[in-house]
Every structure is written in C-alpha cells, then in structure tokens.
Amino acid sequence: MLDSFNRRINYLRISVTDKCNLRCRYCMPEEGIPLMSHDEILSFEQIVEIVKKGVELGMNKVRLTGGEPLVRKKIINLVSMIGEINGITDFAMTTNGILLKKYAKDLFLAGLHRVNISLDTLDPKRYSEITRGGNLNDVLDGIKAAGNAGLNPIKLNCVVKKSSSESDARLVFEYAKKHKLEVRFIREMNISKGLFWVVEGGNGGNCNECNRLRLTCNGVVRPCLFSDCGFDIKETGIEGALVGAIKNKPEFGILSTNHKFYNIGG
C-alpha cells in the first residue's frame, strides 16, 4: 500500500513489551518506568491478527522489538505463530542479546529469520556503565549462539554520540569485521526535540525512503517515530488503524512528546 508521498509501506515493527532487563542511559531512566498493566498489553492472538491484516495490505517485513522482546513470557510461541503466516519474507527481532544464548535455537526453529543485536562497545566496564549493570559476555555469547543457530545475517546496532569514528564504535567495527557481521551506527536521537540522523550502514532516519509503521505493545499504530500521530486498534479496528497510519504518515519526521524509545521499539 502506498502512502500520500508514494512510499510503499511494507514494514511493521511490533513492540511486544515495555519491559527491559537493561537500563541503557540513552533509552531508559535508571529507576525504570511505570509499566503498563497486563490488561493493556496486546495478546499474542491480537498481534497475529494485526500482522495478518498487515500482510493483506501488502506488508512482508515484520520485526519484533520492545522494551526487550525476549523478556516477554512465552515469546517463542508468538514467533511461531507469526512464522506460520504466509507472505512474510523478512522476519526479524531487535534484542540487546542478553538472553539470546538461551533462546537463539528455539527462535530459529520457531521461524525467526535474523536478529539485530545492540552492542555499543567491546569494553566490559564501559558496557556496564552504558547499560547500568549489563554483562558484555552475555551479549557476546548471545551473538555466537545466534550465528550457530542460523539467525543470519546478524546485524549489530551501535549507538554513538556523534560519529562512527569514536573509540567504542571502532572497537565494534573491528569486532564485526573479524566475525563477518554487519554493523549499523546510530547517532543518539532525541524524540522530543526532533533530533535524528540517517543511520550509517542502514536506512533508518531516511524519511524519503521510510517504509515502516510501528505498533506499540498496547495497540497503537504509529506512522512515524518522530510524530505524535497514532491510531488505537481498540478505537478504529485493526484495518482502520493500519490504513489510518499509512494515510497519515508524514513526509518528514518532526518531533513527538507522547512516547519514548523504550515503548515504541526505536
């Protein structure tokens, strides 16, 4: 389906939870966030129906995000349910990698194609500082497990202050080169101030080519990360929310004051 600016919208990013097992400084407050109640969160069955309707409208690319998607209970069941939907040619997950060693094989067997893994440094102390307590070795074990399971290509998401020439970013680049992984450098963004840049090594942030919608874990379809616009499936129905978001997708992102990275999946 085409939006008002003739962009083909074929990509649905789904936040399956607002919970996370890290507290990355550029994403979440140290004290955490007020979590949504269980009744607010979409069920697996609701998510599957939304994906099916999206496929009917021409979507063929699905990504699971969070929060951290692997902390959602029985997430393998959801992956399996989505994996059985005909028409999806690219089925991925963005994860911090902490739990990948445990779940990588089951994710692949359930139908997931590939993963993007957050990795901002190869320095254990810096990693712990950035994530407020995360263990770098857990992520490295997760990357290895993902490769062994067949979740390829593995893409690393590295957040930088200004550029990929920073010391931490260079360490990630060398690690990716050594292990034949892809890497994307994402400059720190500010949703409420409308500050964003095109991702180096990817197409995120390139408004001219944006092909995505975002579904929050409580059922709001958003046409743009940098916009307050959203359509609640409980109010408009699934098709109404998806079509409304596509028709109201802005030409360029501006800013948003009613959501954060941790509840829309970045």
Image (cartoon, rainbow, N blue to C red):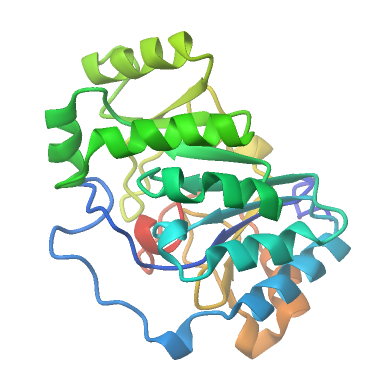
Query: Is 261 on the left-hand or right-hand side of 228?
Result: left
175 up-or-down from 264: above or below: above
Foreground pick, 24 / 212: 24
Query: Is 254 on the left-hand or right-hand side of 61?
Result: left
Residue 101 % position (x, y): 43, 43
- Examine the image and state in which quarter residue 85 appears: bottom right
How many numbered marks appear?
A: 0
| Residue at the (30%, 12%) spot, across then down | 165
| Residue at the (60%, 36%) spot, across then down | 149
119 up-or-down from 226: above or below: above
| Residue at the (65%, 58%) spot, across then down | 249
| Residue at the (38%, 34%) spot, across then down | 141
Q: Quadrant of the N terminus?
A: bottom right
Residue 233 % position (x, y): 64, 82
Foreground pick, 106 / 220: 106
Residue 152 % position (x, y): 63, 31
Q: Residue 118: tell me if it is visible.
A: no
Q: Residue 51: tell me if it is visible.
A: yes
